[in-house]
Image (tube, rainbow, N blue to C red):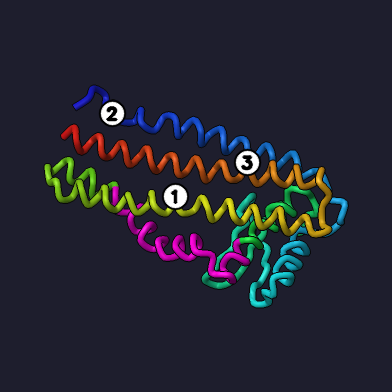
Amino acid sequence: MYPFFYDPSMLFLLPALLFAAWAQWKVQHTFAKYSIKPSQSGKTAEDIAYQILLQHGIQDVIIEHTPGQLTDHYDPRSKILRLSDATYGSDSIAALGVAAHEAGHAVQHARAFIPLVLRNLIYPVAAFSSYMAFPLFFLGLLMGLPFLINLGIYLFAGTVAFHVVTLPVEIDASRRAVAALKQGYMDERELRGVKSVLTAAALTYVAATLMALLQLLRLLWLRNRE
């Protein structure tokens, strides 16, 4: 028992917390920088997403506006590509890059990109695991039940696997986005801005993966200490 509920195992998470804070600042700063720079093409993010889908023969994906800041995402279950307030009707370099990235996810889905298929399979387990892992683990610690402790660790390992698989999915979507925008939509100067935005966004996924890995190490350390 540590005084004032101090838990030294939290030090495991400090590097990830610092990196996550920096990554969040980086993506917001970079997006803001390029969101005020219009693309020479004059096309909106919605236009770009639609054109990329058509180029890949995808006609069953709906593009919708969704509220919020940087809430852009592709929903493979309903085949809906949602663009946020700052993206949907914007012609900025940042908005076009984000829209092309989300369209990249739709292309991955249509082409059955293996890491995306794997991530979609893992997701239900990971969602359950992230909800139940910690209660079971710490209940096991309090009650001295190794079975619950190990079950919590195994469940959280599923969450870690989800984050690890997410990285190649996001990196590939950004690669597809840049390749698509090279097809007459942007010049090299604008593409450098897109790459900056997408690289900054990728850092947030790296931070989430690092956090999950260090959290798993923390749980293992707590188990072995007991």
**Is 112 part of what is drawn in magenta?**
yes
Q: Which residue corresponds to mark 3?
A: 200
x 70%, y 58%: residue: 100
Kind of residue at badge 3: Ala
Q: Which residue corresponds to mark 2?
A: 7
Magenta-drawn segment: 105-133
x 56%, y 68%: residue: 109
| Between 213 and 64, the one nearer to me in the picture | 213
* Relative height, residue 215 to residue 76 (above, below): above
Marks 1 and 2, the one that precedes in the sequence? 2
As drawn, the residue found furthest toward the left would be 144
Kind of residue at badge 2: Asp
Q: CA distance from mark 1 to mark 2?
A: 27 Å
* Relative height, residue 109 to residue 208 (above, below): below
x 79%, y 59%: residue: 183
Q: CA distance from mark 3 to mark 1?
A: 18 Å
